Amino acid sequence: MINQSSAVGRNVQVTGAGIAGVVSCLPERRISNAHFEAQFGEAAVKDVVKMIGVENRYWTDENTSTRDLCAKAGQHLLSNLNWLPETVDALIFVSQTPDFRLPATACALQADLGLSSACIAFDINLGCSGYPYALWLGMTMVQTGAAQRVLLAVGDTISKIVDPTDRSTALLFGDAGTVTAIESATGQTAVFVLGTDGSGVSNLIVPKGAFKDYSQVNDPRLSGKAADCLFMDGGEIFNFTLRAVPALVSETIKRSGVSLEKYDAFLFHQANLFMLKHLIKKSKLPFEKTPINIDQFGNTSCASIPLLLTSSLKERLREESMKLAMFGFGVGYSWAGVSLNVGPLKCVEIIKC
Amino acid sequence: MSEFYEGMAEILEIDLIKISSDFELHSGEAAWDSLAIVSTIALADDCFGVMLEGKALAGCRSIADIEKLIIILKKV
């Protein structure tokens, strides 16, 4: 194992583990842009959509949570992989929209999926960077022998925490729950770059609702905003991505030792279409190898990369092994990149809840 | 500056002919909002290879103010 750090992040190699299958679960309710015209007016909706590139997104109803989406995805995945629930050694739930402040949603999912009581289960609170982080941790558990089979339940229902009157966030986000199965894979190496910059905490935040009330801090940007809803400073976030993402891309590729043209696809967290196009260009990546699906699903937080696997890459991943690089970045600030081989997968699909 | 002015005209949805250093961002003719700020950050990156800070842009009153920020960054 070679572990080093650079200005971009911790560099970690994990060997002997790989992805066995991925299922994404979307809510039934599809929300088109027409939904927002009554609130913001047709012209304003058009302006926002031109920038964010979202045509449709899927939102849960009030009785459905991220846990429910992940439970559906997990059941489907286990049955399609022919994995008996008692053979799962660990379940990690990565989300910012858990069912409760306590207990951990991973415990609820252990029961939902009928996993053994000899199962490691815990939550991780990360957003847009969450999927590569989850892969790193799940694969590390397999590499160390702590677990042979790991489920990564990664998803968010951000629709529940957006302020419907805030045009900078109301149209952008979609809901999705995903589950990825990790197991041992001889000879495979995944190369990760993982980093954090907590100076960005207040730029993408739900100020109130946990155990410290940031809305009481004198921050003029929050005046008139709903304290229990998501606040996003778009300019600051864009500045952060311009500083962090091209460097993350080049560091991940460099550390992998694989030349750019050997990659089959580069999967970016689907943040916002305008930002994505700019970041892809600045990272000097070929657009034709960088699938985009934000138009269909919106920004689904930590679920956006597995959603790319199960939508844009589904057919190829069923048939072949692909060399992929994935890049998650955002809330925290937190970022993570990974270079790995994925496929052929026995199960890679999208289901509806 | 011509490519930059063309970009600013598009971002502000204003005729190019009206765009000059004197153009007032808060005149009511253009929407100088968070979408425009994000677009201007990208435009300055494309045209001059500099990264304008969102906070500094939010404080700009005219296109001349934006140009001053760009000139300072280009000197660094």
Image (cartoon, grey):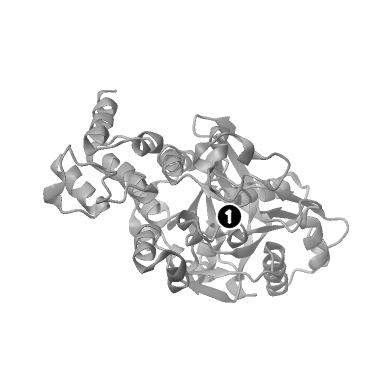
Q: Amino acid at mark 1?
A: Cys
Q: Answer yes or no: is residue A117 visible.
A: yes
Location of residue A326 with respect to A242 vertically, above or below:
below
Q: How many marks?
A: 1
* Residue in the image at 39% along x and 64% along y: A45
Quarter holding the N terminus of chain A is: top right
Q: Is residue A260 left or right of residue A208?
A: left
Q: Is residue A94 left or right of residue A276?
A: right
Category of crowding for the residue at label 1, using alpha-carbon neighbours closer than 10 angstroms: few (below 14), some (14–19), many (at least 20) = many
Tell which of B9 and A116 is nearer to you. B9
Q: Which residue is mark 1?
A: A302
Quarter holding the C terminus of chain A is: bottom right
Tell which of A167 and A117 is nearer to you. A167
Image location of residue A9, percent across then percent down: 54, 34
Q: Answer yes or no: is residue A90 visible.
A: no
Tell which of A307 and A185 is nearer to you. A307
Image location of residue A22, percent across then percent down: 61, 65
Residue furthest to the left in view is B17
Q: Which structural element holds mark 1?
A: helix
Q: Is residue A294 left or right of residue A196?
A: left
Location of residue A87 with respect to B25 vertically, above or below:
below
Q: Is residue A352 left or right of residue B43?
A: right
